[in-house]
Structure formats: C-alpha cells, structure tokens
Image: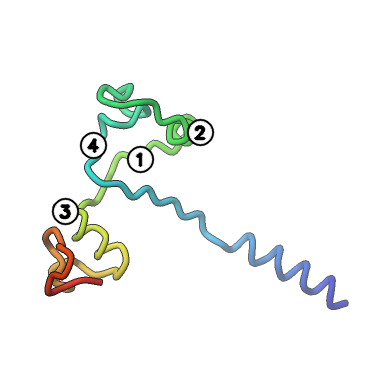
C-alpha cells in the first residue's frame, strides 16, 4: 500500500511542478543569439536555437543597467534601489550580497 501511495504522490507532484527557464548573461543583446535575426553578431547558439524552433522565442525582457543590479534583483526579488545595489559592485565595497 505504501509503495502505491508514494508512486501516486510522486506522479501528482511531478505534474504540479512549473517549468522554469532562466538565461542569465552579461553584456549580450538580441543580435548576439543566432535564434534572433540570424545571429548577426554571434557565434552559433544551438541549444537556444533548438528551444526557439520548438516555439519558445521570447520577445519581452526585463533588465537592469548593470550586472550587479540585475543579479541582486534576481537573487533577492527586490528592486536594486531597495537593496542599494544599483551600480557595479566592487570588491570590498560598502554594499554586497
């Protein structure tokens, strides 16, 4: 009975989990990926191209003006103005994560 219960429970939880897809890069633009505009300034990005060919070609993006601000927003879920990390962080600086 417990084997059957754990199987049905794991099957149910597998169906409920969301698909989350994150690409986190620095200093990249839409023309750097071959899936967009034939990668005018890019080397090939076959994994992203494969995802795009299957129907996941994203067209809306949210970004921060620096890598530090973007990373702090992603890690904390807060706007950089709330964490104080709105510009490029330096080693030994007064703020950091």
Which callout, 3 or 2, points to the residue nearer the camera?
3
Quick one: which residue is furthest to the front in this view?
92
| Residue picked out by circle 3 | 66
- Left or right of 40? Residue 80 is left
Find the distance from the CA under tag 2 to the CA under tag 1: 12 Å
- Does 31 appear above or below 14? above
- Judged by depth in the image, the label closer to the viewer, 4 or 2, is 4
Give the farthest residue toward the bottom.
Answer: 2
Q: Nearer the viewer, residue 87 or 6?
A: 87
- The residues tagged by marks 4 and 2 sit, at their Cα atoms, a distance apart of 21 Å
Q: Residue at x 49, y 32 (%)?
A: 50
From mark 3 to mark 4, how far is it between C-alphas? 13 Å
Q: Earlier in the sequence, mark 1 or mark 3?
A: 1
Q: Quadrant of residue 58?
A: top left
The numbered dot on residue 29 is: 4
> Of helix, strand and loop, which one carries label 4?
loop
Label 4–label 2 contact, CB within 8 A: no
Type of colouring? rainbow
Separation of disc 1 and disc 3 at Cα? 21 Å
Q: Which residue is mark 2?
A: 54
Separation of disc 3 and disc 2 at Cα? 31 Å
In the figure, 87 relative to 31: above or below?
Answer: below
Q: Residue 69: which numbered mark, if any?
A: none
Q: In front: 92, or 66?
A: 92
């Amino acid at each position: 009975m417990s084997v059957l219960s754990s199987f049905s429970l794991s099957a149910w939880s597998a169906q409920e989990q969301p698909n989350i897809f994150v690409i986190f890069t620095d200093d990249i633009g839409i023309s750097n990926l071959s899936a967009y505009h034939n990668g005018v300034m890019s080397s090939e990005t076959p994994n992203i191209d494969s995802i795009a060919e299957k129907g996941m070609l994203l067209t809306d993006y949210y970004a921060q003006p620096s890598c530090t601000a973007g990373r702090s927003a992603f890690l904390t879920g807060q706007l950089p103005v709330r964490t104080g990390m709105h510009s490029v962080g330096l080693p030994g600086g007064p703020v950091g994560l």
